[in-house]
Amino acid sequence: MFKGITKRWVLNTLLVVIVVVLFVVFCLSYAVRIYYYHSVSQTLSGESAEFVTVLNNSTSASSTFASTARGYVENFDGKEKMEITAIDASGKVIITSTGFTPDSTEQMPDYQKATSENLNFYEWTGKLSSGENVKAVTRLVRNSEGECVGAVRCIISLTDIDRTVGTAIAVFCGVGLLIVSLVLFSGIYFIRSIVTPVRELSETAKKIAQGDFGTRIEKTHDDEIGDLCDSINNMATELGAADRLKNDFISSVSHELRTPLTAIKGWAETMQYCGTVDKETFDKGMDIIVKESSRLTSIVEELLDFSRLQSGRMMIMKEKLDILAELDDVLYMMKERAISEEKHLLYDKPESMPPVFGDKNKLRQVFINIIDNALKYTQSEGVVGIQVLEQGKFLHIVVTDTGCGIAPDDLPRIKDKFYKANQNVRGSGIGLAIADEIITLHDGSLDIQSGIGVGTTVTISIPVAED
Protein backbone atom coordinates (compact mmCIF):
# COMPACT_ATOMS: atom_id res chain seq x y z
CA MET A 1 0.00 0.00 0.00
CA PHE A 2 2.80 2.38 0.93
CA LYS A 3 5.91 2.70 -1.15
CA GLY A 4 8.54 5.20 -2.11
CA ILE A 5 8.29 8.67 -0.56
CA THR A 6 4.96 7.84 1.14
CA LYS A 7 6.48 4.84 2.90
CA ARG A 8 9.49 6.84 4.06
CA TRP A 9 7.23 9.59 5.35
CA VAL A 10 5.04 7.12 7.27
CA LEU A 11 8.09 5.42 8.82
CA ASN A 12 10.22 8.50 9.46
CA THR A 13 7.63 11.12 10.36
CA LEU A 14 4.15 9.84 11.14
CA LEU A 15 5.30 6.94 13.35
CA VAL A 16 7.68 9.24 15.21
CA VAL A 17 4.86 11.76 15.79
CA ILE A 18 2.55 8.99 16.99
CA VAL A 19 5.20 7.64 19.38
CA VAL A 20 5.95 11.13 20.72
CA VAL A 21 2.24 11.93 21.16
CA LEU A 22 1.62 8.62 22.96
CA PHE A 23 4.60 9.24 25.24
CA VAL A 24 3.43 12.78 26.05
CA VAL A 25 -0.15 11.59 26.68
CA PHE A 26 1.13 8.81 28.95
CA CYS A 27 3.38 11.20 30.89
CA LEU A 28 0.64 13.80 31.31
CA SER A 29 -1.91 11.16 32.33
CA TYR A 30 0.51 9.67 34.85
CA ALA A 31 1.36 13.12 36.20
CA VAL A 32 -2.33 14.04 36.64
CA ARG A 33 -3.04 10.74 38.42
CA ILE A 34 -0.03 11.16 40.69
CA TYR A 35 -1.03 14.76 41.43
CA TYR A 36 -4.60 13.89 42.47
CA TYR A 37 -3.61 10.76 44.39
CA HIS A 38 -0.84 12.67 46.13
CA SER A 39 -3.37 15.38 47.10
CA VAL A 40 -5.64 12.73 48.58
CA SER A 41 -2.70 11.23 50.48
CA GLN A 42 -1.78 14.62 51.92
CA THR A 43 -5.39 15.24 52.96
CA LEU A 44 -5.64 11.85 54.68
CA SER A 45 -2.25 12.23 56.31
CA GLY A 46 -3.05 15.72 57.57
CA GLU A 47 -6.46 14.80 58.93
CA SER A 48 -5.21 11.65 60.68
CA ALA A 49 -2.27 13.57 62.14
CA GLU A 50 -4.62 16.26 63.50
CA PHE A 51 -6.85 13.59 65.02
CA VAL A 52 -3.90 11.90 66.68
CA THR A 53 -2.64 15.23 68.00
CA VAL A 54 -6.01 15.94 69.62
CA LEU A 55 -6.11 12.45 71.09
CA ASN A 56 -2.53 12.63 72.40
CA ASN A 57 -3.27 15.86 74.20
CA SER A 58 -6.09 14.28 76.18
CA THR A 59 -5.44 10.54 76.30
CA SER A 60 -3.94 8.64 79.21
CA ALA A 61 -6.12 5.49 79.24
CA SER A 62 -8.17 3.45 76.91
CA SER A 63 -11.44 4.72 78.33
CA THR A 64 -10.35 8.31 77.85
CA PHE A 65 -9.26 7.50 74.25
CA ALA A 66 -12.72 6.12 73.44
CA SER A 67 -14.59 9.14 74.79
CA THR A 68 -12.26 11.64 73.16
CA ALA A 69 -12.44 9.80 69.84
CA ARG A 70 -16.26 9.80 69.99
CA GLY A 71 -16.32 13.51 70.61
CA TYR A 72 -13.94 14.30 67.76
CA VAL A 73 -15.67 12.04 65.22
CA GLU A 74 -19.14 13.29 66.13
CA ASN A 75 -18.03 16.89 65.62
CA PHE A 76 -15.97 16.19 62.45
CA ASP A 77 -16.90 18.69 59.69
CA GLY A 78 -15.54 16.78 56.67
CA LYS A 79 -17.89 13.83 56.84
CA GLU A 80 -18.97 14.33 53.24
CA LYS A 81 -15.38 14.12 51.94
CA MET A 82 -13.95 11.30 54.02
CA GLU A 83 -14.81 8.69 56.57
CA ILE A 84 -13.03 8.60 59.94
CA THR A 85 -13.04 5.50 62.08
CA ALA A 86 -11.76 5.23 65.67
CA ILE A 87 -10.49 1.80 66.67
CA ASP A 88 -9.56 0.73 70.21
CA ALA A 89 -6.49 -1.27 71.22
CA SER A 90 -8.31 -4.59 70.80
CA GLY A 91 -9.21 -3.80 67.19
CA LYS A 92 -12.85 -3.02 67.88
CA VAL A 93 -14.40 -0.13 65.98
CA ILE A 94 -15.54 2.52 68.45
CA ILE A 95 -17.22 4.93 66.09
CA THR A 96 -17.30 5.99 62.43
CA SER A 97 -18.11 9.39 60.97
CA THR A 98 -20.88 7.84 58.83
CA GLY A 99 -22.87 6.89 61.90
CA PHE A 100 -23.43 3.36 60.61
CA THR A 101 -22.07 0.19 62.13
CA PRO A 102 -19.22 -0.94 59.88
CA ASP A 103 -19.37 -4.27 58.10
CA SER A 104 -17.40 -6.71 60.21
CA THR A 105 -16.43 -8.71 57.13
CA GLU A 106 -14.77 -5.71 55.45
CA GLN A 107 -11.02 -6.04 55.56
CA MET A 108 -8.84 -3.16 56.71
CA PRO A 109 -5.42 -3.93 55.19
CA ASP A 110 -3.86 -0.64 56.32
CA TYR A 111 -4.90 -1.17 59.97
CA GLN A 112 -3.81 -4.81 59.95
CA LYS A 113 -0.42 -3.87 58.46
CA ALA A 114 0.15 -1.05 60.94
CA THR A 115 -0.71 -3.17 63.99
CA SER A 116 1.00 -6.37 62.86
CA GLU A 117 4.29 -4.58 62.18
CA ASN A 118 3.84 -1.97 64.93
CA LEU A 119 3.95 0.91 62.42
CA ASN A 120 2.81 4.33 63.51
CA PHE A 121 1.48 5.09 59.99
CA TYR A 122 0.46 3.04 56.99
CA GLU A 123 -1.30 3.97 53.74
CA TRP A 124 -3.27 1.60 51.49
CA THR A 125 -4.93 2.02 48.10
CA GLY A 126 -7.32 -0.65 46.85
CA LYS A 127 -10.87 -1.75 46.35
CA LEU A 128 -13.54 -2.49 48.94
CA SER A 129 -15.69 -5.61 48.72
CA SER A 130 -18.28 -3.44 46.94
CA GLY A 131 -15.72 -2.73 44.20
CA GLU A 132 -15.27 0.94 45.17
CA ASN A 133 -11.74 2.21 44.76
CA VAL A 134 -10.50 3.93 47.96
CA LYS A 135 -7.41 5.23 49.69
CA ALA A 136 -7.08 4.63 53.43
CA VAL A 137 -4.61 5.71 56.12
CA THR A 138 -4.19 4.25 59.62
CA ARG A 139 -2.31 6.01 62.44
CA LEU A 140 -1.67 4.35 65.78
CA VAL A 141 -2.36 6.37 68.93
CA ARG A 142 0.08 5.86 71.81
CA ASN A 143 0.06 7.02 75.44
CA SER A 144 2.90 8.71 77.24
CA GLU A 145 4.54 5.32 77.91
CA GLY A 146 4.48 4.47 74.19
CA GLU A 147 1.78 1.86 74.47
CA CYS A 148 -0.78 1.64 71.66
CA VAL A 149 -4.18 2.67 73.04
CA GLY A 150 -6.01 2.71 69.71
CA ALA A 151 -5.92 3.84 66.11
CA VAL A 152 -7.57 6.29 63.78
CA ARG A 153 -8.40 5.27 60.23
CA CYS A 154 -9.22 7.83 57.50
CA ILE A 155 -10.64 6.67 54.17
CA ILE A 156 -11.58 8.59 51.01
CA SER A 157 -13.39 7.25 47.97
CA LEU A 158 -11.39 7.63 44.75
CA THR A 159 -14.41 7.36 42.46
CA ASP A 160 -14.61 11.11 41.77
CA ILE A 161 -10.84 11.35 41.56
CA ASP A 162 -10.69 8.49 39.07
CA ARG A 163 -13.47 10.13 37.08
CA THR A 164 -11.54 13.42 37.00
CA VAL A 165 -8.32 11.63 36.04
CA GLY A 166 -10.19 9.68 33.36
CA THR A 167 -11.63 12.90 31.96
CA ALA A 168 -8.17 14.46 31.86
CA ILE A 169 -6.76 11.37 30.12
CA ALA A 170 -9.61 11.48 27.61
CA VAL A 171 -8.87 15.16 26.92
CA PHE A 172 -5.16 14.39 26.48
CA CYS A 173 -5.97 11.50 24.14
CA GLY A 174 -8.35 13.70 22.17
CA VAL A 175 -5.73 16.42 21.81
CA GLY A 176 -3.14 13.80 20.84
CA LEU A 177 -5.51 12.29 18.27
CA LEU A 178 -6.20 15.77 16.91
CA ILE A 179 -2.46 16.43 16.58
CA VAL A 180 -1.88 13.10 14.83
CA SER A 181 -4.86 13.79 12.54
CA LEU A 182 -3.53 17.25 11.66
CA VAL A 183 -0.09 15.81 10.98
CA LEU A 184 -1.65 13.01 8.93
CA PHE A 185 -3.82 15.27 6.79
CA SER A 186 -1.13 17.90 6.33
CA GLY A 187 1.34 15.12 5.52
CA ILE A 188 -1.02 13.54 2.99
CA TYR A 189 -1.49 16.93 1.32
CA PHE A 190 2.24 17.56 1.35
CA ILE A 191 3.06 14.07 0.08
CA ARG A 192 0.51 14.40 -2.69
CA SER A 193 1.97 17.76 -3.64
CA ILE A 194 5.31 15.98 -4.08
CA VAL A 195 4.45 12.42 -5.12
CA THR A 196 1.96 13.39 -7.84
CA PRO A 197 4.36 15.79 -9.62
CA VAL A 198 7.21 13.32 -9.16
CA ARG A 199 5.13 10.58 -10.79
CA GLU A 200 4.34 12.96 -13.65
CA LEU A 201 8.03 13.78 -13.89
CA SER A 202 8.84 10.07 -13.99
CA GLU A 203 6.29 9.40 -16.73
CA THR A 204 7.54 12.35 -18.74
CA ALA A 205 11.15 11.26 -18.29
CA LYS A 206 10.21 7.80 -19.58
CA LYS A 207 8.60 9.35 -22.66
CA ILE A 208 11.67 11.48 -23.25
CA ALA A 209 13.89 8.41 -22.83
CA GLN A 210 11.79 6.69 -25.51
CA GLY A 211 12.43 9.57 -27.92
CA ASP A 212 9.30 11.70 -27.43
CA PHE A 213 11.11 15.02 -27.07
CA GLY A 214 7.93 17.01 -27.67
CA THR A 215 6.34 16.02 -24.35
CA ARG A 216 6.22 18.68 -21.62
CA ILE A 217 5.32 18.88 -17.91
CA GLU A 218 2.87 21.52 -16.72
CA LYS A 219 4.43 23.65 -13.99
CA THR A 220 1.93 24.16 -11.16
CA HIS A 221 4.12 25.37 -8.27
CA ASP A 222 6.92 27.90 -8.14
CA ASP A 223 9.20 25.82 -5.92
CA GLU A 224 11.88 23.13 -6.21
CA ILE A 225 9.42 20.83 -8.01
CA GLY A 226 8.62 23.68 -10.39
CA ASP A 227 12.34 24.24 -10.99
CA LEU A 228 12.69 20.52 -11.72
CA CYS A 229 9.79 20.74 -14.20
CA ASP A 230 11.54 23.63 -15.93
CA SER A 231 14.81 21.68 -16.00
CA ILE A 232 13.17 18.58 -17.53
CA ASN A 233 11.28 20.70 -20.07
CA ASN A 234 14.52 22.47 -20.98
CA MET A 235 16.26 19.11 -21.17
CA ALA A 236 13.56 17.82 -23.53
CA THR A 237 13.98 20.93 -25.66
CA GLU A 238 17.76 20.53 -25.75
CA LEU A 239 17.50 16.80 -26.48
CA GLY A 240 15.03 17.50 -29.25
CA ALA A 241 17.37 20.09 -30.73
CA ALA A 242 20.32 17.71 -30.34
CA ASP A 243 18.33 14.93 -31.99
CA ARG A 244 17.47 17.18 -34.91
CA LEU A 245 21.11 18.23 -35.17
CA LYS A 246 22.15 14.58 -35.08
CA ASN A 247 19.73 13.74 -37.86
CA ASP A 248 20.90 16.73 -39.86
CA PHE A 249 24.48 15.62 -39.19
CA ILE A 250 23.78 12.10 -40.41
CA SER A 251 22.05 13.50 -43.49
CA SER A 252 24.89 15.96 -44.11
CA VAL A 253 27.62 13.34 -43.62
CA SER A 254 25.75 10.91 -45.86
CA HIS A 255 25.60 13.59 -48.53
CA GLU A 256 29.25 14.51 -47.99
CA LEU A 257 30.28 10.88 -48.37
CA ARG A 258 27.98 10.18 -51.30
CA THR A 259 29.22 13.12 -53.39
CA PRO A 260 32.88 12.04 -53.67
CA LEU A 261 31.91 8.37 -53.91
CA THR A 262 29.58 9.17 -56.79
CA ALA A 263 32.29 11.13 -58.58
CA ILE A 264 34.88 8.39 -58.01
CA LYS A 265 32.48 5.66 -59.12
CA GLY A 266 31.33 7.62 -62.16
CA TRP A 267 34.78 8.34 -63.49
CA ALA A 268 36.01 4.85 -62.69
CA GLU A 269 33.12 3.36 -64.69
CA THR A 270 33.74 5.82 -67.52
CA MET A 271 37.39 4.82 -67.71
CA GLN A 272 36.52 1.12 -67.40
CA TYR A 273 33.71 0.76 -69.92
CA CYS A 274 34.49 3.44 -72.49
CA GLY A 275 37.59 1.62 -73.73
CA THR A 276 40.51 3.74 -74.72
CA VAL A 277 40.08 7.39 -73.73
CA ASP A 278 42.22 10.30 -74.76
CA LYS A 279 44.93 11.50 -72.43
CA GLU A 280 43.12 14.72 -71.54
CA THR A 281 39.99 12.86 -70.44
CA PHE A 282 42.07 10.28 -68.60
CA ASP A 283 44.07 12.97 -66.78
CA LYS A 284 40.89 14.84 -65.89
CA GLY A 285 39.25 11.67 -64.57
CA MET A 286 42.26 10.67 -62.52
CA ASP A 287 42.57 14.19 -61.15
CA ILE A 288 38.92 14.10 -59.99
CA ILE A 289 39.33 10.62 -58.50
CA VAL A 290 42.43 11.71 -56.57
CA LYS A 291 40.80 14.93 -55.31
CA GLU A 292 37.55 13.23 -54.31
CA SER A 293 39.51 10.41 -52.63
CA SER A 294 41.42 13.01 -50.64
CA ARG A 295 38.15 14.71 -49.75
CA LEU A 296 36.67 11.37 -48.71
CA THR A 297 39.75 10.62 -46.60
CA SER A 298 39.42 14.03 -44.95
CA ILE A 299 35.77 13.38 -44.08
CA VAL A 300 36.59 9.96 -42.63
CA GLU A 301 39.48 11.39 -40.60
CA GLU A 302 37.15 14.09 -39.31
CA LEU A 303 34.62 11.46 -38.25
CA LEU A 304 37.33 9.42 -36.54
CA ASP A 305 38.52 12.52 -34.68
CA PHE A 306 34.96 13.24 -33.64
CA SER A 307 34.61 9.66 -32.35
CA ARG A 308 37.83 10.05 -30.35
CA LEU A 309 36.58 13.39 -29.04
CA GLN A 310 33.28 11.86 -27.90
CA SER A 311 34.99 8.97 -26.12
CA GLY A 312 37.74 11.13 -24.63
CA ARG A 313 40.44 9.23 -26.52
CA MET A 314 41.83 12.14 -28.54
CA MET A 315 45.57 12.11 -27.93
CA ILE A 316 47.86 15.11 -28.33
CA MET A 317 51.56 14.48 -28.99
CA LYS A 318 53.22 17.79 -28.16
CA GLU A 319 56.62 18.92 -29.33
CA LYS A 320 58.36 22.22 -29.85
CA LEU A 321 57.51 23.43 -33.35
CA ASP A 322 57.59 26.45 -35.64
CA ILE A 323 54.00 27.54 -36.07
CA LEU A 324 54.88 29.64 -39.15
CA ALA A 325 56.23 26.60 -41.00
CA GLU A 326 53.04 24.62 -40.35
CA LEU A 327 50.89 27.54 -41.44
CA ASP A 328 52.98 27.97 -44.62
CA ASP A 329 52.33 24.33 -45.57
CA VAL A 330 48.58 24.73 -45.12
CA LEU A 331 48.48 27.97 -47.12
CA TYR A 332 50.47 26.33 -49.92
CA MET A 333 47.79 23.61 -50.05
CA MET A 334 44.98 26.18 -50.09
CA LYS A 335 46.56 28.56 -52.61
CA GLU A 336 45.55 26.66 -55.74
CA ARG A 337 41.99 26.24 -54.46
CA ALA A 338 41.69 29.99 -53.79
CA ILE A 339 42.92 30.76 -57.30
CA SER A 340 40.54 28.26 -58.91
CA GLU A 341 37.62 29.75 -56.95
CA GLU A 342 38.73 33.29 -57.84
CA LYS A 343 39.24 34.30 -54.22
CA HIS A 344 42.12 36.27 -52.74
CA LEU A 345 44.16 34.53 -50.04
CA LEU A 346 46.36 37.13 -48.31
CA TYR A 347 49.00 36.25 -45.75
CA ASP A 348 50.92 38.86 -43.79
CA LYS A 349 53.83 36.66 -42.80
CA PRO A 350 56.06 37.94 -39.99
CA GLU A 351 59.81 37.42 -40.09
CA SER A 352 59.85 35.18 -37.04
CA MET A 353 57.75 34.00 -34.10
CA PRO A 354 58.64 32.12 -30.93
CA PRO A 355 57.98 28.35 -31.02
CA VAL A 356 55.01 26.65 -29.39
CA PHE A 357 54.47 23.22 -27.83
CA GLY A 358 51.91 21.37 -29.87
CA ASP A 359 50.88 18.49 -32.07
CA LYS A 360 51.73 19.67 -35.59
CA ASN A 361 49.28 17.32 -37.31
CA LYS A 362 46.40 18.41 -35.06
CA LEU A 363 47.28 22.09 -35.41
CA ARG A 364 47.54 21.70 -39.16
CA GLN A 365 44.09 20.11 -39.10
CA VAL A 366 42.76 23.16 -37.23
CA PHE A 367 44.34 25.59 -39.73
CA ILE A 368 42.92 23.63 -42.67
CA ASN A 369 39.46 23.59 -41.11
CA ILE A 370 39.42 27.33 -40.32
CA ILE A 371 40.82 28.46 -43.69
CA ASP A 372 38.59 25.96 -45.53
CA ASN A 373 35.54 27.47 -43.81
CA ALA A 374 36.72 30.99 -44.65
CA LEU A 375 37.09 30.13 -48.34
CA LYS A 376 33.85 28.12 -48.36
CA TYR A 377 31.72 31.01 -47.06
CA THR A 378 33.48 33.73 -49.09
CA GLN A 379 32.05 34.69 -52.45
CA SER A 380 34.08 34.99 -55.66
CA GLU A 381 36.51 37.95 -55.60
CA GLY A 382 36.27 37.94 -51.82
CA VAL A 383 39.28 38.14 -49.51
CA VAL A 384 40.57 35.78 -46.85
CA GLY A 385 43.35 37.28 -44.75
CA ILE A 386 45.72 35.54 -42.31
CA GLN A 387 47.84 37.24 -39.65
CA VAL A 388 50.12 35.90 -36.91
CA LEU A 389 50.53 38.16 -33.86
CA GLU A 390 52.41 37.83 -30.60
CA GLN A 391 50.78 39.24 -27.49
CA GLY A 392 52.27 38.43 -24.12
CA LYS A 393 52.64 34.70 -23.69
CA PHE A 394 50.35 33.81 -26.61
CA LEU A 395 50.55 33.59 -30.38
CA HIS A 396 47.35 34.62 -32.18
CA ILE A 397 46.57 33.27 -35.66
CA VAL A 398 43.82 35.53 -37.00
CA VAL A 399 41.81 34.38 -40.04
CA THR A 400 39.46 37.03 -41.48
CA ASP A 401 37.08 36.67 -44.41
CA THR A 402 34.63 38.90 -46.25
CA GLY A 403 31.98 36.19 -46.49
CA CYS A 404 28.30 36.13 -45.66
CA GLY A 405 28.89 36.17 -41.89
CA ILE A 406 27.09 34.41 -39.08
CA ALA A 407 23.75 35.47 -37.58
CA PRO A 408 23.80 36.64 -33.93
CA ASP A 409 21.45 33.78 -32.93
CA ASP A 410 23.76 31.18 -34.49
CA LEU A 411 27.06 32.60 -33.21
CA PRO A 412 26.86 31.26 -29.60
CA ARG A 413 26.25 27.70 -30.90
CA ILE A 414 28.59 27.71 -33.88
CA LYS A 415 31.10 25.49 -32.03
CA ASP A 416 28.47 23.01 -30.84
CA LYS A 417 28.59 19.46 -32.18
CA PHE A 418 26.45 18.85 -35.29
CA TYR A 419 25.47 22.53 -35.49
CA LYS A 420 25.45 24.16 -38.94
CA ALA A 421 24.48 27.81 -39.27
CA ASN A 422 24.10 27.50 -43.05
CA GLN A 423 22.52 24.28 -44.28
CA ASN A 424 23.10 25.24 -47.92
CA VAL A 425 26.89 24.93 -47.68
CA ARG A 426 28.63 21.57 -47.65
CA GLY A 427 30.13 20.31 -44.41
CA SER A 428 29.37 17.94 -41.55
CA GLY A 429 28.99 20.48 -38.76
CA ILE A 430 31.65 18.95 -36.52
CA GLY A 431 34.77 20.63 -37.86
CA LEU A 432 34.67 23.64 -35.53
CA ALA A 433 33.79 21.44 -32.53
CA ILE A 434 36.90 19.32 -33.22
CA ALA A 435 39.07 22.39 -33.83
CA ASP A 436 37.89 23.99 -30.59
CA GLU A 437 38.66 20.79 -28.64
CA ILE A 438 42.14 20.52 -30.17
CA ILE A 439 42.98 24.11 -29.27
CA THR A 440 41.60 23.57 -25.77
CA LEU A 441 43.88 20.54 -25.37
CA HIS A 442 46.75 22.90 -26.29
CA ASP A 443 45.72 25.21 -23.41
CA GLY A 444 44.59 27.80 -25.92
CA SER A 445 41.31 29.24 -27.17
CA LEU A 446 39.34 29.62 -30.38
CA ASP A 447 37.27 32.82 -30.59
CA ILE A 448 34.83 33.73 -33.36
CA GLN A 449 33.45 37.18 -34.17
CA SER A 450 31.06 37.72 -37.03
CA GLY A 451 28.29 39.82 -38.48
CA ILE A 452 25.81 39.30 -41.30
CA GLY A 453 27.19 40.78 -44.50
CA VAL A 454 30.41 41.84 -42.76
CA GLY A 455 32.37 38.64 -42.59
CA THR A 456 33.92 36.49 -39.91
CA THR A 457 37.10 36.70 -37.86
CA VAL A 458 38.46 33.57 -36.17
CA THR A 459 41.28 33.99 -33.64
CA ILE A 460 43.33 30.95 -32.63
CA SER A 461 45.36 31.58 -29.46
CA ILE A 462 48.18 29.21 -28.50
CA PRO A 463 50.61 29.70 -25.58
CA VAL A 464 54.26 30.29 -26.43
CA ALA A 465 56.67 27.52 -25.48
CA GLU A 466 58.51 28.31 -22.26
CA ASP A 467 62.27 27.88 -22.24
Image (cartoon, rainbow, N blue to C red):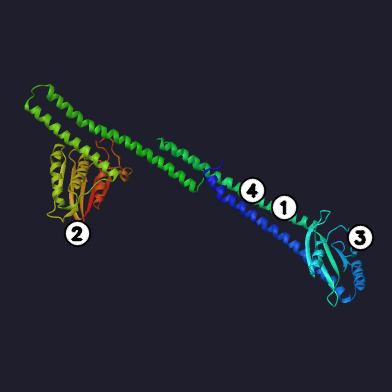
Q: Is residue 400 visible?
A: yes
Measure the alpha-carbon separation of dots 1 and 3: 38 Å
Badge nearest the viewer, 2 or 3: 3
Marks 2,3: beta carbons within 8 A: no
Give the mark, 2 or 4, whose residue is nearer the N terminus.
4
Q: Residues within 10 Å of mark 2 (few under 14, many from 20)?
A: few
Q: Is residue 255 above or below residue 332?
A: above
Image quadrant for the C terminus? bottom left
Query: Which mark's residue is nearer the viewer, 1 or 2?
Result: 1
Query: Label 4 is placed on what type of residue?
Result: Ser
Q: Secondary structure at mark 4?
A: helix
**Image-based side of 284 in relation to 455, left or right:** left
Q: Is residue 241 left or right of residue 110?
A: left
- Judging from the image, what secondary structure is the residue with disc 1 in? helix
Q: Residues within 10 Å of mark 1 (few under 14, many from 20)?
A: some
Look at mark 1 in the image and give the residue it sits on. Answer: 170
Q: Residue at x 22, y 44 (%)?
A: 370
Residue at the (92%, 66%) spot, across then down = 74
- Residue type at mark 2 is Glu
Quarter of the picture containing the N terminus is top right
Q: Position of residue 305 (x, y in %)?
A: 24, 42
Residue 36 on image: x %, y %: 75, 61
Q: Looking at this view, is 411 or 119 the one in front?
A: 119
Residue where numbered disc 3 is placed: 101
The residue sitting at the bottom extreme is 144
